Image: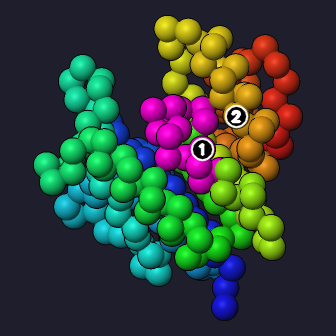
Amino acid sequence: MRDAILFYCQHVLGMGHLVRSMALARALAARFRVVFLNGGRVPRGLPRPVGVEFVDLPPLGFDAMERLVSRDSRWPLERAQRERRETILRTFHRVQPRAVVVELFPFGRKRFADELLPLFDEARAARAHRPLLLSSLRDILTTGHRDQVGHDERACTLANRYLDAILVHADPHFARLEDSFRPEQDLRVPV
């Protein structure tokens, strides 16, 4: 039996995060059992990678005012959030992954911390086979937050507390993490 990877992706605006995460899952599926936690709607016509098990969470997104909303009328927001947390943890225990890969968090998607931090805590508490916790990042992070320093500090604190490594999908000659991420404290996680 192949080692498992649990891959979490929450796309909210556009499809870039989803397409990139699905490409990574497809490549990983050549060597690992990949279970993909999908937090948004997959557009019609976008094929799901062969050999990747999908677990569709109740879809969430942002409205025009950037408020978190349920994208499925059958799931009021609070119920959808509770179901997502429970499904994520249930899937983690069922799969018993060797690695958990989370797209963007804690460098983004902070509104999803209520479902991701319990996953991180469960992974850290695993006794027999503690999985690696990895954050998967695109080449350049979004900057210009109202409190960019606070944002970077919060992300750095969470990364240092939980992550085993950060995967940056970029040519370091083009873009490096420190080009768009500048916390005051040291990032101690391998990049």
Question: Is most of the magenta stretch helix, strand or loop?
Answer: helix
> Magenta segment: does it hold 110?
yes
What secondary structure is found at the residue carrying circle 2?
helix
Q: Which mark is residue 31?
A: none
Using the numbered discs, state the Cα–Cα distance from disc 1 to disc 2 in whole angstroms. Answer: 9 Å
174 sits to left or right of 58:
right
What residue does disc 1 label? 117
26 sits to left or right of 19:
right
The residue at 61%/36% (across/down) is 106
92 sits to left or right of 126:
left
Of tags 1 and 2, the one toward the viewer is: 1
Image quarter hosting the C terminus = top right
Q: Which residues are magenta?
A: 106-120
Mark 1 crowd level (few <14, some 14–19, many ≥20, 10 Å Cα): some
The residue at 40%/54% (across/down) is 84
What residue does disc 2 label? 158
For the question of whether residue 154 can be seen, the reply is yes
The residue at 21%/44% (across/down) is 76
Mark 2 crowd level (few <14, some 14–19, many ≥20, 10 Å Cα): some
Asked whether the residues under the numbered discs 1 and 2 touch, taking CB atoms below 8 Å apart as contact, a structural biologist would say yes
